[in-house]
Amino acid sequence: MSNIELSHPISRDNRRLLSLSGKIWFVAALVGQAVFIAFILSYYGSRTATGNFAAWNDKGLITGHVSGDAIGNTMFAVHVLLAAYVTFGGLFQLIPALRQRFPAAHRWNGRAFIATAMFMALGGLWMTWVRGSHLSLISGLSVSLNGVLILVFAGLALRAVMQRRIDTHRRWAMRTFMVVSGVWFFRVFLMAWVVLNKGPVGMNNTLSGPADIALSFGSYLIPLAGLEIYLAAQRSHSGSFKLATSGLVLCLTAIMAVGIFGATTFMWFQDM
Ligand code: HEM
């Protein structure tokens, strides 16, 4: 039954459609993350390079620069500058053509990506709880769970590749990409919500409104659920499952595109 279904032209079309929807999603994420990298480098990079640290706070941060707090300020600077690399490093790992053409670069970038992601998660946890950079308990807990998932998933991706279990490594690496992108997804989902509802419905200044809570946990749980459905659809012999998943991925891509537009225009580059 499964072989008959797989060789059927409609099933082949559904398989191609699923793969195409995954590629469209990835290209949209790549564009949106490239804009995020451009924002980090132009905003934090230029202020840090010129020593104008106090100007980090021009964009209403939780804590940001505090005069006299050398350790906190250094942690913040390292965190935001590494954010540009970790975002780039994750994209680089997932592009199949680069992986095949430059296997040594894939291995070295993979090690650097995992080490940076873990360092950023630990640094983020330190800033959240030791430095006190959280707006409310629930928002602190949400980003902390994101940090813990980064540590666990990156560790499992590393363990699998060291044991040469490449298929398992591939799956944990994709999950790591999703949770490392949680911070980016959060900004994109927040702005998609604001744009689609024509205002901050269910949100407040301490990120503890119902929409804030749903979007902050959703910023990594929704992409993780989407990835698991996509991987299950890839494995499945059911043409209709592949078709439904392609539709879901394209819907999520459309919402993400609205959020990328919103974050670019109203959050990252609103002064331009
Ligand atoms: C690994 C992916 C991460 C990226 C790409 C990232 C990116 C950033 C960026 C760009 C900022 C500057 C604020 C802004 O302009 O929005 C920032 C600040 C911050 N991040 Fe992260 N981050 C990541 C992970 C985490 C994690 C896992 C945590 C917590 C467990 C965390 C906690 C913080 C805190 C507390 C600040 C300082 C907020 C402030 O003082 O205003 N980050 N991060």
Image (tube, grey):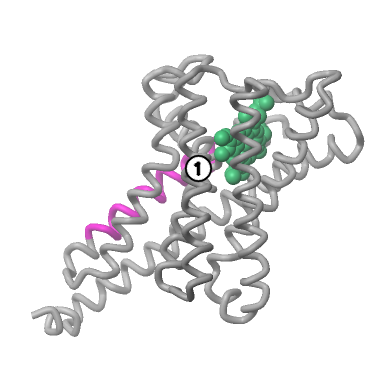
Answer with left or right where residue 179 lies relative to residue 86: left
Where does the magenta region start and end? Answer: 244-263
Residue at the (71%, 47%) spot, across then down: 82
Badge 1 amino acid: Gly
Which residue is at the far right?
50
Residue 195 x %, y %: 46, 30
Judge whether residue 134 can be spotted in this image: yes
Answer with left or right where residue 106 lies relative to residue 182: right
Q: Mark 1 = which residue?
A: 182
Residue 158 x %, y %: 53, 63
Residue 177 x %, y %: 51, 54
Residue 48's quadrant in the figure? Answer: top right
Residue 157 is one of the magenta-drawn residues: no
Answer with left or right where residue 58 lies relative to residue 92: right
Judge whether residue 264 can be spotted in this image: no
In this view, the residue in front, 76 or 202, is 76
Residue 250 is one of the magenta-drawn residues: yes
Q: Work out whether 266 lies above or below 231.
A: above
Image quarter in which the N terminus is found: bottom left
Residue at the (24%, 65%) spot, across then down: 242
Image quarter in which the C terminus is found: top right
| Disc 1: residue Cβ within 8 A of ligand 1's nearest atom | yes
- Classify mark 1: helix, strand or loop: helix
Dot 1: few (<14), some (14–19), or many (≥20) neighbours within 10 Å?
Answer: many
Residue 24's quadrant in the figure? Answer: bottom left
In this view, the residue in front, 39 or 135, is 135
Q: Work out whether 120 lies above or below 28.
A: above
Residue at the (18%, 73%) spot, across then down: 237
In this view, the residue in front, 88 or 156, is 156
Residue at the (72%, 25%) spot, across then down: 64
Q: Main secondary structure of the magenta part?
A: helix
